[in-house]
Image: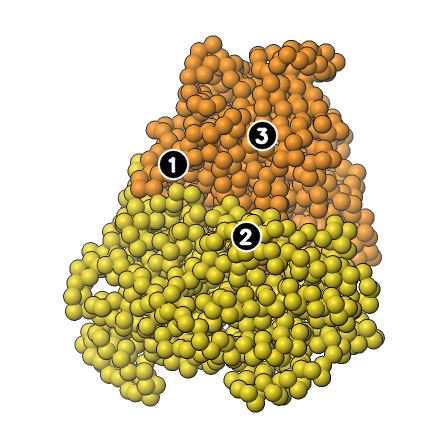
Chain colours: A yellow, B orange
Amino acid sequence: MLTILLSLGSGLFAQNHPGLILTREGVREVRAAQAAAPLFEAVVAQTRAEVDAEIKAGIAVPIPKDMAGGYTHERHKKNFFILQKAGNLYQLTGEEKYAVFVRDMFLAYADLYPTLGLHPTMKSYATGKIFWQCLNDANWLVYASQAYDCVYDFLTEKERRKLEKDLFRPMADFLSVENPQFFNRIHNHSTWGCAAVGMIGLVMRDTQLVHRALYGLRNDGLDDSMLDNDGGFIKTDGVRRAGFLAQLDLSFSPDGYFTEGPYYLRYAMTPFLLFAKALSNHEPDLKIYAYRDSILKKSIYSLLNLTDAQGRFFPVNDAQKGMSWRAREVVAAVDIAYADFGNDGRLLSVAEKQGRVLLDGTGFRVARDLAKGLARPFVQKPVFFRDGPDGDKGGLSVLRMPTPGGGEWCAVMKYSAHGMGHGHFDKLSYSIYDETGEVVQDYGAARWVNIDQKGGGRYLPENKTFAKQSIAHNTLVVNEMSHYDGKVKDAEAHHPDVYFTDLTGKNYQVAAADEKHAYPQAALHRTVALLKDETLKNPLFVDVFRVASGVENQYDLPVWFQGHLLSANFEYAAATDTLTTLGTKNGYQHIWREATGKPAADNAQITWFNNGKFFSLTSLVSPSDELVFGRTGAHDPEFNLRRDPCFLIRRKGAKSSVFISILEPHGAYNPVAEIPEDPFGHIESVRLIFDSDAYTIFDFRNINGRVWTVFLANQNADKSARHAVRAEGKMYEWTGPFAFRTP
Amino acid sequence: MLTILLSLGSGLFAQNHPGLILTREGVREVRAAQAAAPLFEAVVAQTRAEVDAEIKAGIAVPIPKDMAGGYTHERHKKNFFILQKAGNLYQLTGEEKYAVFVRDMFLAYADLYPTLGLHPTMKSYATGKIFWQCLNDANWLVYASQAYDCVYDFLTEKERRKLEKDLFRPMADFLSVENPQFFNRIHNHSTWGCAAVGMIGLVMRDTQLVHRALYGLRNDGLDDSMLDNDGGFIKTDGVRRAGFLAQLDLSFSPDGYFTEGPYYLRYAMTPFLLFAKALSNHEPDLKIYAYRDSILKKSIYSLLNLTDAQGRFFPVNDAQKGMSWRAREVVAAVDIAYADFGNDGRLLSVAEKQGRVLLDGTGFRVARDLAKGLARPFVQKPVFFRDGPDGDKGGLSVLRMPTPGGGEWCAVMKYSAHGMGHGHFDKLSYSIYDETGEVVQDYGAARWVNIDQKGGGRYLPENKTFAKQSIAHNTLVVNEMSHYDGKVKDAEAHHPDVYFTDLTGKNYQVAAADEKHAYPQAALHRTVALLKDETLKNPLFVDVFRVASGVENQYDLPVWFQGHLLSANFEYAAATDTLTTLGTKNGYQHIWREATGKPAADNAQITWFNNGKFFSLTSLVSPSDELVFGRTGAHDPEFNLRRDPCFLIRRKGAKSSVFISILEPHGAYNPVAEIPEDPFGHIESVRLIFDSDAYTIFDFRNINGRVWTVFLANQNADKSARHAVRAEGKMYEWTGPFAFRTP
């Protein structure tokens, strides 16, 4: 460690300001620009207007009091964004008024900060001083350090001394040594903490802080049983390392997957990239961008690929829906990736959709190259991510196929490790998307981020009691218990296992995984696939869920379809007078039982309508299965939950069992033309041919009598293994864990 | 009558083909076009592609069997559109293959038609032959007559004789003399019937049919008690006239308002305009366009103004939501209005949004003038429509004000006559729209038009049991009974009365009306207004609902807000374990009671979130009022209803009473930025100063302590009348039925 630190130091003190994110070279490039960069110019103009308005309104540095959504919170939050913008404007335009504004606001903070105790809310596992949690204080410092860098040379030495003594250094200590439970984790909170401490350290030329940021606190004295506010553990079993480098090692899988999911990866990306960029500027010899086989670059591409056709992140684990690659954090990621990771023209087309760029040298280059017409389309591809630092803790697959007319059919299967405090008990769950958005949803988090009226913008109680529970997801629930009995510690101790992935088949993409620990008495094995065929108008989604158990259980397999139910091929009785809940705990208490039915045949089929399209789900069922239509909203005393529908197949008293469903998108309807096209599903039935622990064979038939057959080997993923099964008096033979025979 | 008919005849027989809708002059103009008309060319290309595909697929004229949504229905429907298109293409391109296709399809129909009895479904009050109802058969003939006109000269005389003898003449008779209950009404069904009979008559040079179409059947022998499928009466009390001219006289108010509402006006517009255009072409002396002070022109502008900012029709009465000015019927209306009613450049901007034009001379002119840059913006204005043929049966007002940033705040108050079979029991109801769409909704119809899975695409049972009932609307319900006890006959015998309208105030727009017959024991008086003021960021909606009664009643005032409830300023208890219905009949049986609360003070305030914006409703309440949150979905055995929320103020044991509410839009939030702007309402409270049958005075206060006062004279609409009221020890004086005093 010492070696690196010394080498760091040598670079550090040779630097001039600005040199953290905006650099002297960047400023020179922008100021000397000959080439047109209209998007950059627009951002400069817009930022000028915004900052000028703030200058006009005057500096406000109120005594901290409120939760997120409240005045003091939102004011301090706005301040750090404005500080960073004003600092950059000072450098880019040379106008002193911006430096004066930054200086004066910093001095106001330097007067306030020493007077502050902990924030009065005291609701966080790591209460901040300016904000209710250290996390937001760290956000503040990450942005403020950039502003300080930009006005460093403008300030007198006396001013700098005051700011560093009364504000920056105490804040850096507060966020690290005084709050080890915040700083010394492998968690996005700590990434912000390390970036904050390290970035201000780089500007202040404080090697001690930079060292602390890179390597963490040596002895944090933290107990393994400590929890954060989300119910996550502060320390991971067996992991004693901390600091930025440890986070680069342990936060991502070798494929750049982030176990908390894309919503939090997007959030964590900012401190990772900003601190990395600052280190790259100050100490190129550290080669931080190349660290761990260019893990930061991989993580940016992973983030961009974990989106639906509209660029919205798949809302796995705790995630607010609608967050997308248009977010400011992704603007930063795309601009830095473009400028520093090889000028990939596909990133320019994402930047174009974002419609804005960073107010620095990377943003300028993106804008300039966009104007040069160097953009190429960014097309999300089917992709398989391993999870876990060593890539051995399950994974997540995104299956995607184009549909006629330029649409998309996309399935996400999640068999990654538990997403720490933000993890859901959703092992082997899937969700489905088309070109407009969700078709079969992942509920996401029960939270209205920053909306004061909803629990101060924090996670709502229903996040734990519903959104995290297994029944809230499209996965199997045994005996109305959530996976791992809803215990984070147990879920973190295990993970699903990758069984087999093939995203390159001519007619199919398939992902299969095992979950052997979620239930002591039942092993779960799921295969999901997209299938296509010339004679099928649209690709199909196929789901085969096998559960192996030696004892009788109740199995519930929900499908959280989005839209309005049009029809079902079975009789059901709706609860017309009184609604009651589907159960009493583990999320069931939040679901109203709207209707209950019984299969009329071996197949249950429902059709729903959403966003101008029809969807039909055809499921293999047993005569004794119960078919339930449910809806969220029970035990929701403050209207925190959406009212969303689900369809649920319930099988009682079964040991080993298999569930097979086919989902097809079809047709179109809009209320202007009022002419339905193709409103009926094309798949008529699914038929089980053979099922054992080792093999599952089934076929499905369309309305024209064509039959397709699917063969699964459930216990041998060897792609070259040959299998033969006798069933219905015939020998079925195939090779590998998955085969799809078209008519 | 004879005079007109003879004059008609003289024009008629002088005409050549085509001369019905597409004319020889139109064809010549298009073929000789020098000016660019790219939109028209696109339509020609698109229509060619569509018709060529049909020619390739071959003619299909199946034996009628299905309801709407089913194969034979959709096939015959497609056929008539394609016939019309192929006929026009023949004229415009001169390519014979189109004429051959039309001829052959007509000959197939001529073979089939004589073999048909009534359509096997037998579900309509006027069952058709090709379709399940005469209405659709009339649609067929309106389009087919245009195709026949286009290929008339191409056909041999023998072919024409066969078509007229076996197909057109029998169909025209079937739709008129054989179905007087369909033909001889004042109703959109009959408009189609008259246009069909009249248009084929013009092409066939059959003066008898044209006469029948213009003047109706002399003796229809219809009983006054007959009903159609929607529960509407076949005959209107006291009205014996029928035929096209009677419909022009009786279907519209003098302002061009159509009592069934814009959804049906849009539908009825096609036969009105097509037959009028055909009459105008064949017999200019009739001056049909100038008839009744240019009533058709007025009706087109009324249709275009009955839209939200997105061009979607206000869904009053039976209406499918989402229907908009992009509909094909409105394309026809806009093109004809542009070409024949004075080349209003504002219509071109609507045509531009429609993105298509008619395949005829009017469409050509619109496309050409669009290309010339003659379009001007079409800005919907505040507008008041009288209802009733003589303009004395109530009305409907659209209040609209711009909001900062280019948005809109729009309130629709409905106090028109009952919309015949499509009328709802929604007297004095309002609905609210912003620039994105609905804020406080009118439920519209319980129907999925043409979606076979939902009751064959017809009106669903819940349309009568819920959507038409008073509680489904934003209006007062007395003793849980619908207006006029839900009886169409009674509702048609009366109507609300216009009390006062002023859409020109500097700071306000206001509409007020009385409904004295909906309840025998209670008179209703409602005033709605939009208010603005420099110190208010956004315009407000204000609702003052007075009920005068000498006996104690229960009053329910629902607000069908669209969105997710964020907060309420009163305690409420949610039904967490069991949901029960709000009542047992008159629509109440379809509403789940999700929560019940009690006011904490004189005001009840709720805030909700929808489409990126916040909305706060502040209502004056009594301590004993019950505050209910409800949601549709009870007694809905086939999932026909949407699950939509409402907030309801219930007042029990009250005689005369007043309800005052203020609704304000505010702020913004999106899940990408996650930064709420202005998430709290600005109106703090509403206070009643004085209330009597004659006067209501109240003020409201914002969070900065500013106070605005509103004065209403409830029984004297004289704008110059001076009023003085002593209340709270002060004299309040104002002039006219409404005054708004800003601070």
Looking at marks 3 and 1 on the same chain, the residue that comes earlier in the sequence is marked by: 1
Which one is in front in this view, the residue at disc 2 or the one at disc 1?
Answer: 2
- The quadrant holding residue B706 is top right
Which residue sits at x=43%, y=59%? A229
Q: Quadrant of the N terminus of chain B?
A: top right
Query: Which one is nearer the viewer's eye here, B217 or A15?
Result: A15
Tag 3 near tag 1, CB within 8 Å: no
The residue pinned by badge 2 equals A68
What number is the disc on residue B685?
3
Q: Chain of mark 2?
A: A
Neighbour class for label 1 at 10 Å: few (<14), some, many (≥20)?
some
- The quadrant holding residue A34 is bottom right
Q: Secondary structure at mark 1?
A: strand
Neighbour class for label 2 at 10 Å: few (<14), some, many (≥20)?
many
State how far apart marks 3 and 2 are (Cα). 26 Å
What number is the disc on residue A352?
none
State how far apart marks 2 and 1 are (Cα). 26 Å
Give the percent coordinates (x, y) of residue B579. 33, 38
Q: Amino acid at mark 3?
A: Ser
Q: Amino acid at mark 2?
A: Ala
Which residue sits at x=40%, y=77%? A239
Which residue sits at x=75%, y=29%? B506
Neighbour class for label 3 at 10 Å: few (<14), some, many (≥20)?
many
The residue pinned by badge 1 equals B573
Give the percent coordinates (x, y) of residue A659. 28, 65
Query: Which one is nearer the viewer's eye here, B35 or A186?
Result: A186
Which residue sits at x=47%, y=14%? B655
- The quadrant holding residue B254 is top right
State how far apart marks 3 and 1 are (Cα). 23 Å
B18 with respect to A548 (left or right): right
Q: Secondary structure at mark 3?
A: strand
Q: Quadrant of the C terminus of chain B?
A: top right
